[in-house]
Amino acid sequence: MSLDADMTPLEAGRGFSERVMPGLETVLAKKYDDLLPGFSEWQIGTVYGGVYARDALDMKTRQLATVAGLAVMGAQTRPQLKIHVASALKIGATKREIAETILPMSLYGGFPAAINALNAAMEVFDEEET
């Protein structure tokens, strides 16, 4: 899903997010929209329509880049990392590709961050198998 001339970022974002994380907008709306009205649409339009739906990278590459970024940030991103590992699997990344994406992050975020990320990924792998 990429942003074309006839699509708004929100429309493109909805298409992208539904493909990799079905129901995300609904979950965001239920959790945050009472406190921050419009937050779910803003996130879907900005993050998924404005960034993820761009056409220069394929979906798998973008998800692996996201996994790398979250891995290097450390344990505080564990919930988001697990979501993006599951999304990467859903769109065709292998467990090995995900692990190999995390490995070099040990050079930038440190070994503890990489180990935490690998552990989070392994939890997702185990959940996917059951």
Image (cartoon, rainbow, N blue to C red):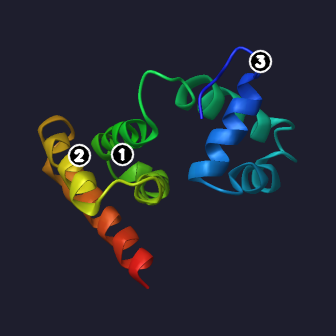
Q: How far apart, in angstroms, are the residues tagged by discs 1 and 3? A: 30 Å
Task: Count neighbours of disc 2 (C-alpha within 10 A) and say few if under 14, some if 14 to 19, many if 20 or more.
Answer: some
For residue 2, above or below residue 60 = above
**Label ID, residue 128:** none
Amino acid, disc 3: Asp
Nearer to me, 113 or 27:
27
Q: Is residue 94 left or right of residue 29?
A: left
- The number of discs equals 3
Amino acid, disc 2: Thr
**Label ID, residue 6:** 3
- How far across and down, in percent of the image, does residue 73 sit? 33, 41
Nearer to me, 6 or 106:
6
Residue 13 in sight in this render: yes
Q: Earlier in the sequence, mark 2 or mark 3?
A: 3
Mark 2 secondary-structure assignment: helix
Residue 43 in sight in this render: no
Which residue carries the number 1 mark? Answer: 67
Quarter in which the N terminus is drawn? top right
Q: Earlier in the sequence, mark 1 or mark 3?
A: 3
Residues under numbered marks 2 and 1 in contact, where contact means CB atoms less than 8 Å apart: yes
Residue at 74% x, 48% y is: 25
